[in-house]
Image (spheres, grey):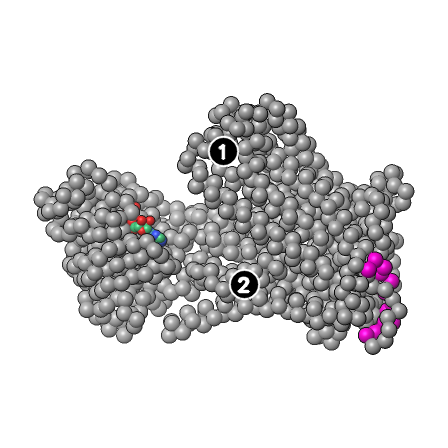
């Protein structure tokens, strides 16, 4: 009886894990199937290396093409702005991480770390809007145009990848054995020298991995870039001047694409996906190496003389290097301050401009079609519906997959490796590609029109990897001695998992769920063509379409004459993200305390 | 149904030619041993010699370790516990275990003790109340904890936690209790209490205890086995082992000359 139950349990968990694989397969199959005719018609070479994009919405697969479909300008544009983002955000992020770990007073460290968490949660439409309203006018002072172009996108994208770079670099800096630092100081190096000459080099591969992950993020970013790149399908020319990135191509034209054009847009997504996957493979290779190195290093830790010798090597030319160290320290402190100020600037700017327009009527009033008196109540409802649906799908699946991975697989067999690979891939797929996927699967499935149902399902796939990973992380934190205690009493696997392990991991899992809510709120690219962008109609069921808050904000910001409402929506979005971030931290801490022995 | 399961397992343990590998590492080498019922048997030996490993064979906790391979015969009473038909959960119910570090579950004292009985289907509040009280009494903790039954168990002192863990093990009425260095994390007073408890418990149960403390072994055990590098070097009455060891290595160990 119990044996059967255990078997069924295991099977259910394995099936959830299998669904993750299925999701990846489905994404590839559908994108390839949809783009294959376009690739065939246009020619892969012409498509990738052609530098004219002049689509014709009347082109069809059984007639000669009248438009031109080459995305090379956009590939160049994407790569150029990624490099720019890396030069700005990567460097800033790296030095900010060094600042946080080594030069930051403890109290400030906590505040700044969570502030960077907030920076990660701010919706990309808000970044874009900030770019349009704050950055472009400043740049326009120096620019021949309105400021749009490579410089603007690089700066904004740089800010967006900053949190990724900071948090990963920080982790790898913190995992350098303390003995390194102490050894260097014991040899007479100053704090700054020890940091830059001994600790930072030891964390190098982890830092590089963080930059690569940042690149992945920059490649796939959509809405913010769309708002400030100018978007003409030309090569970027210098720091200013309109250009288009791959993601923008999809967002801009998907709404009214003809047959071949639609195929070509999906093909654009495929090209983007290829880039992102390459970057992700690079990332796994690098982080595998970082882990290997770390292991080697802890082994070396016992043989101190070795470390000592290395330090002596450094010591030989320390006098020469001292100068660059103090420059490093200065840069670190500057970067930390700059990052903090930027956050204050973005949030402050949005609040000051938007708060006066956040009125009860704006939030909860009824929106009459055609009226200038805009309200976002329908979007609030749509967003809540989307959150409920996507969590209802993603949380059980994700948690069960994590349980399967962590509790049921002692050995890394082939199936487990494939599941992990699938989750890594899902984690790397850009949100606009999820949007494309949702459009050609769920939207088609439900009759060809967008609906909150289609949008919610699309986003649930997108949430899966985050939930799996953070749940696994929380499961890992549960002491094995508790599991042993339960087994030793004759409890089976299921009982142990549900009564002992999951309750102990609850804090981590709940805070992951709260952060996932934030993700649903802030994403716009995957919703735009799956859930729709109608603001005025109140959804009455999941079959209706509707704009989530972030999509509404994109619409309001884009139309130009609803700027105040866009600011107000931005305030709402940032407010929600802030609250959810605080809540996540609170939930984790509270439950942790409870389980770690607070008296009732 | 319940009666029948209790019949399955006796109380004495007989091991013939046990070998155990963790991957390629040969951790137990041809160990044979007969552990008598209703007595305290101690395992001693230097760190890493395989005491815990051997102990965990009796409730099949090693099954949880991937890459662990076990050969040989392990019998409790007449039952071959590594037989394919053995119900592992029932086995673990009969063979309780107390760990080196107290590992109370992050729930109330009451729920900790009720965890085992609930696992085996006891749901009635009155019945559970009774089990909780008798288990706590049996582990000499009732007076201390009777007013804190609904406090979190992780808030107790180390000694209280360990006795709670013993109570938790007792709550499913095991025939055998395995203790892996149960007092090594505790102060002398708590240690004394647990040693007294062993004396009390061995009236109905078989106790196997791993210890690094020679005095403890002489104080509480009837039989002692000395392990070295995965082998059982010497095994016999505790008095004899400590007064006139037959093997030179045993003598060197108990007189503190290596380990
Ligand atoms: N899960 C495992 N995987 C691999 N090797 C293990 C595992 N558990 C124990 N070992 C190894 O088996 C040997 C015996 O370990 P065991 O824990 O049984 O020793 P012990 O006698 O209990 O030592 P101690 O007194 O330190 O608790 C050791 O060399 C140990 O490294
Ligand atoms: Mg041990």
Instruction: Indicate the position of residue A195 as horizontal and vertical percent values.
Output: 56, 31
Q: Secondary structure at mark 2?
A: helix
Instruction: Indicate the position of residue A487 as horizontal and vertical percent values.
Output: 35, 60
| Residue labelled with disc 2 | A419
Instruction: Indicate the position of residue A179 as horizontal and vertical percent values.
Output: 47, 33
Image quarter in which the C terminus of chain B is found:
top left
The region drawn magenta spans A50-61
Image quarter in which the N terminus of chain B is found:
bottom left
For label 2, being within 8 Å of ligand 1 is answered no
What subunit carries mark 1?
A: A
Query: Tag 1: Cα neighbours inside 10 Å, few (<14), some, or many (≥20)?
Result: many
Give above or below for A151 relative to A431.
above
As for residue A400 lying within the magenta part, the answer is no
Residue pictured at 18% horizontal, 55% vertical? B202
The secondary structure that dominates the magenta segment is loop
- Per the model, the C-alpha gap separating discs 2 and 1 is 37 Å
| Residue labelled with disc 1 | A180
Q: Residue furthest right?
A: A144
Total marks in image: 2
Q: Looking at the picture, do discs 2 and 1 lie on one chain? A: yes
As for residue A52 lying within the magenta part, the answer is yes
Residue pictured at 41% horizontal, 69% vertical? A6
Q: Secondary structure at mark 1?
A: helix
Residue pictured at 85% horizontal, 56% vertical? A233
């Amino acid at each position: 009886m119990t044996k059967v139950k255990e078997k069924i349990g295991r099977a259910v968990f394995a099936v959830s894990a299998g669904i993750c694989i299925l999701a990846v397969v489905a994404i590839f199959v559908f994108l390839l199937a949809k783009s294959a005719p376009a690739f065939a018609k246009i020619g892969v070479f012409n498509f990738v290396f052609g530098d004219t994009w002049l689509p014709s919405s009347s082109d069809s697969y059984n007639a000669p093409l009248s438009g031109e479909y080459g995305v090379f300008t956009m590939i160049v544009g994407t790569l150029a702005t990624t490099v720019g983002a890396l030069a700005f955000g990567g460097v800033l992020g790296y030095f900010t991480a060094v600042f946080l770990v080594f030069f930051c007073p403890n109290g400030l460290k906590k505040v700044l770390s969570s502030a960077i968490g907030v920076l990660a949660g701010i919706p990309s439409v808000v970044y874009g809007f900030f770019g349009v309203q704050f950055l472009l006018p400043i740049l326009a002072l120096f620019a021949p145009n309105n400021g749009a172009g490579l410089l603007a996108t690089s700066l904004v994208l740089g800010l967006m990848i900053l949190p990724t770079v900071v948090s990963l670099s920080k982790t790898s800096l913190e995992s350098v054995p303390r003995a390194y630092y102490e050894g260097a100081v014991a040899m007479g190096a100053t704090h700054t020298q020890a940091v830059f000459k001994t600790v930072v080099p030891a964390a190098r591969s982890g830092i590089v991995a963080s930059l690569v992950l940042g690149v992945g993020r920059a490649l796939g970013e959509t809405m913010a870039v769309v708002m400030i790149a100018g978007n003409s399908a030309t090569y970027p020319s210098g720091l200013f001047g309109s250009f288009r990135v791959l993601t923008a191509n999809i967002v801009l034209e998907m709404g009214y694409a003809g047959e071949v054009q639609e195929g070509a847009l999906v093909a654009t997504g495929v090209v983007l996906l290829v880039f992102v996957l390459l970057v992700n493979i690079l990332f796994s290779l690098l982080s595998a190496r970082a882990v290997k190195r770390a292991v080697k290093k802890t082994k070396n830790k016992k043989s101190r003389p070795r470390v000592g010798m290395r330090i002596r090597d450094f010591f030989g030319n320390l006098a020469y290097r001292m100068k660059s160290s103090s420059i490093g320290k200065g840069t670190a402190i500057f970067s930390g301050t700059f990052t903090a100020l930027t956050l204050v600037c973005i949030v402050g700017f949005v609040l000051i401009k938007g708060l006066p327009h956040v009125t009860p009527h704006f939030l909860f009033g009824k929106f009459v079609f055609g009226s200038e008196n805009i309200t976002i109540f329908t979007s609030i409802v749509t967003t809540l519906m989307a959150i409920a649906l996507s969590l209802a799908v993603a949380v059980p699946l994700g948690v069960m997959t994590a349980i399967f991975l962590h509790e049921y697989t002692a050995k890394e067999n082939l199936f487990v490796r494939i599941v992990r690979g699938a989750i890594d891939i899902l984690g790397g797929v850009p949100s606009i590609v999820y949007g494309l996927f949702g459009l050609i699967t769920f939207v088609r499935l439900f009759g060809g029109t967008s609906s909150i149902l289609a949008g919610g399902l699309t986003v649930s796939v997108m949430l899966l990897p985050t939930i799996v990973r953070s749940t696994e992380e929380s499961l890992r934190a549960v002491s094995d001695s508790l599991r042993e205690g339960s087994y030793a009493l004759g409890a089976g696997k299921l009982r142990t998992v549900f009564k002992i392990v999951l309750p102990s991991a609850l804090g981590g899992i709940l805070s992951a769920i709260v952060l996932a809510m934030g993700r649903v709120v802030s994403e716009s690219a995957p919703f735009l063509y799956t859930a729709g962008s109608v603001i005025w109609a109140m959804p009455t069921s999941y079959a209706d379409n509707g704009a989530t808050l972030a999509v509404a904000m994109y619409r309001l910001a884009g139309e130009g004459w609803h700027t105040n409402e866009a600011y107000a929506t931005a305030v709402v979005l940032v407010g929600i993200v802030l609250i959810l971030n605080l809540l996540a931290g609170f939930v984790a801490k509270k439950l942790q305390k409870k389980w770690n022995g607070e008296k009732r | 149904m319940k009666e029948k399961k209790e019949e399955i397992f006796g109380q004495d343990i007989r091991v013939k030619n046990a070998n155990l590998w963790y991957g390629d590492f040969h951790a137990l080498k041809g160990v044979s041993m007969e552990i008598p019922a209703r007595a305290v048997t101690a395992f001693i030996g230097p760190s890493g010699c395989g005491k815990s490993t051997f102990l965990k064979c009796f409730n099949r906790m090693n099954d949880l370790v991937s890459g662990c391979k076990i050969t040989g015969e392990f019998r409790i009473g007449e039952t071959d516990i590594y037989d394919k038909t053995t119900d592992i959960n029932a086995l673990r119910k009969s063979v309780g275990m107390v760990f080196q570090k107290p590992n109370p579950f992050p729930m109330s004292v009451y729920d900790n003790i009720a965890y085992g009985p609930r696992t085996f289907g006891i749901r009635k509040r009155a019945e559970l109340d009774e089990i909780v009280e008798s288990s706590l009494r049996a582990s000499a903790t009732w007076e201390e904890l009777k007013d804190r039954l609904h406090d979190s168990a992780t808030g107790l002192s180390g000694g209280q936690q360990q006795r709670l863990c013993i109570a938790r093990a007792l709550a499913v009425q095991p025939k055998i209790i395995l203790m892996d260095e149960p007092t090594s994390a505790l102060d002398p007073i708590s240690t004394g209490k647990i040693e007294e408890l062993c004396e009390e418990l061995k009236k109905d149960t078989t106790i196997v205890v791993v210890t690094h403390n020679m005095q403890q072994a002489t104080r509480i055990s009837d039989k002692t086995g000395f392990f070295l590098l995965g082998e059982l070097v010497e095994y016999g009455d505790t008095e004899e082992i400590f007064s006139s060891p037959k093997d030179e290595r045993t003598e060197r160990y108990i007189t503190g000359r290596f380990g």
